[in-house]
Amino acid sequence: MFTTAKVASLFACLLFALAPLPADEVPQYTASGELKFPGQYREWVYLTSGFDMSYSVSMKMNNAHRFDNVFVNPEAYKSFVKTGTWPDHTMLVLEVRDAQGKGSINQTGNYQGERVAVEVHVKDEARFPGNWAFFGFEPGETAARTAKMKPPSADCYSCHAAHAAVDTTFVQFYPTLLPIATAKGTLAASYLQEMAAPK
C-alpha cells in the first residue's frame, strides 16, 4: 500500500525525469539542422578514456596511436545514475587526441597531445526517427562551428544498435556506469546475449 511519503517520492522522481536540461547543455542546431559545436564539453562529466581502441580487427592505425576521451552533459549523467538510462537531450562527446611519446621528462608510455577529431552522439526524440544521431567535427572546431548529421546508413548507427549496452550507447566501456545499468536492469538484451556467447 502506498504511503504519502512513497507517493511524494515517486512524484519527485517523475518530476526529475521530466525536468528539462539547462539551456547550455541542450543540443543547439542551426536553421538547416546542423549541430552547433558544444564548446563547453570539457567542463562536463568525464566518463572514460580508451587507447588505440578499434571495433574491427582489420582497421589499420597507420602507426599512429590515439586516445579517446568521453564526456557527457552533467544533467544527463545525473539522470543516468538515477535511472540507468539516458534522458532526452543527452549529448555524449567522443574526443580523439594524438598519443605522444617522448616529451619533456617523459621517456616511456604515452600522454595526450593535439585533438584530431570530435564526434557527438545526441539523443533528441522529437528530431531524429531513431531518437539518436551522430555528428562529426573536424580538428580545431570552436563553438561557432557546426556539423551535419551523419546519414542513418553510416556504420556507426548499425554498430551501436547491435552492440551497445544501454540505449545504443557503449556503456560497457564506461566503468562507473556499467554497474549502475546492471543494477537497474537496463542492459540491452542484444548486449547480454553477446556477452553470454562463447568467445
Image (cartoon, rainbow, N blue to C red):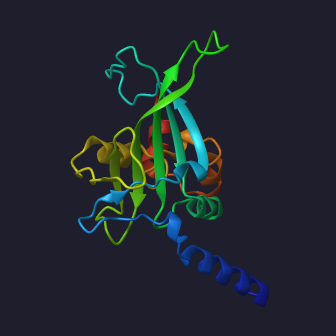
Total marks placed: 0
Q: Residue at x 58, y 19 (%)?
A: 110
Q: Quadrant of the N terminus?
A: bottom right
Give coordinates of residue 126: x percent, y percent. Answer: 34, 72
Give coordinates of residue 18: x percent, y percent. Answer: 54, 77
- Figure check: 2 above or below 42: below
Q: Residue at x 27, y 41 (%)?
A: 155
- Figure check: 1 above or below 20: below
Farthest bottom residue in view: 4
Using the rendered view, name the quadrant where residue 141 is placed: top left
Nearest the viewer among 81 and 150 is 150
Q: Residue at x 28, y 65 (%)?
A: 129
Give coordinates of residue 118: x percent, y percent. Answer: 41, 42
Nearest the viewer among 108 and 17 is 108
Nearest the viewer among 130 and 29 is 29
Give coordinates of residue 21: x percent, y percent. Answer: 54, 70
- Figure check: 48 above or below 71: above
Q: Residue at x 27, y 64 (%)?
A: 33
Left or right of 49? Residue 29 is: left
Left or right of 187? Residue 29 is: left
